[in-house]
């Protein structure tokens, strides 16, 4: 699947990218009982900007682990 990059313009603010678990709010906001767990490999980093050149390195990763990171959500709510 290919998703084109989205651009959000809010007044004089331009938002190029939002990371996982982020939110754009324009008023009071409260997150209750929120949990995020992710395994991310950013070997060459992220390029987040206008007119950033795209370099496509060719690489290979051998990850033989069945479970890399166990995570559990414990809530008191």
Image: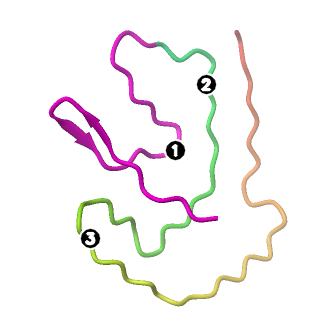
Location of residue 56 (image quadrant): bottom left
- Residue wearing tag 3: 52
Mark 2–mark 3 Cα distance, whole angstroms, equals 33 Å
Q: Earlier in the sequence, mark 2 or mark 3?
A: 2
Q: At numbered mark 3, what does the secondary structure look like: helix, strand or loop? A: loop
Tell whether 18 sits left or right of 15: right
Residue shown at 74% from the left, 42% from the top: 71
Q: Residue at the location (34% across, 12% down)?
A: 27
Q: Which mark is residue 34?
A: 2
Q: How many numbered marks are there?
A: 3
Residue most extreme to the bottom? 58
| Mark carried by residue 20 | 1
Which residues are drawn in magenta?
Answer: 1-29
74 w.r.t. 29: above or below:
below
How packed mark 1 is, by other alpha carbons closer than 10 Å (few <14, some 14-19, many 20 or more), is few
Q: Nearer the viewer, residue 68 or 58?
A: 58
Residue 4's x, y, as percent? 47, 59
From the viewer's perspective, tell me whether residue 5 is left or right of residue 77.
left
Q: CA distance from mark 3 to mark 1?
A: 21 Å
User: Callout 2 environment at 10 Å: few (<14), some (14 to 19), or many (20+)?
Assistant: few
Identify the residue at image location x=56%, y=88%: 59
Q: Nearer the viewer, residue 2 or 20?
A: 2
Q: Earlier in the sequence, mark 1 or mark 2?
A: 1
Quarter of the image with the C terminus in it? top right
Q: Is residue 53 left or right of residue 28?
A: left
Query: Does the magenta segment cover residue 62?
Result: no
């Amino acid at each position: 699947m290919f998703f084109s990059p989205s651009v959000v313009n809010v007044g004089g603010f331009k938002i190029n990218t939002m990371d996982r678990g982020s939110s754009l709010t324009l008023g009071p906001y409260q997150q209750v009982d929120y949990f995020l767990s992710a395994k991310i490999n950013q070997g060459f980093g992220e390029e987040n900007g206008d007119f950033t050149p795209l370099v496509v390195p060719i690489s290979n990763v051998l990850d033989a682990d069945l479970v890399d990171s166990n995570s559990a959500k414990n809530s008191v709510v």
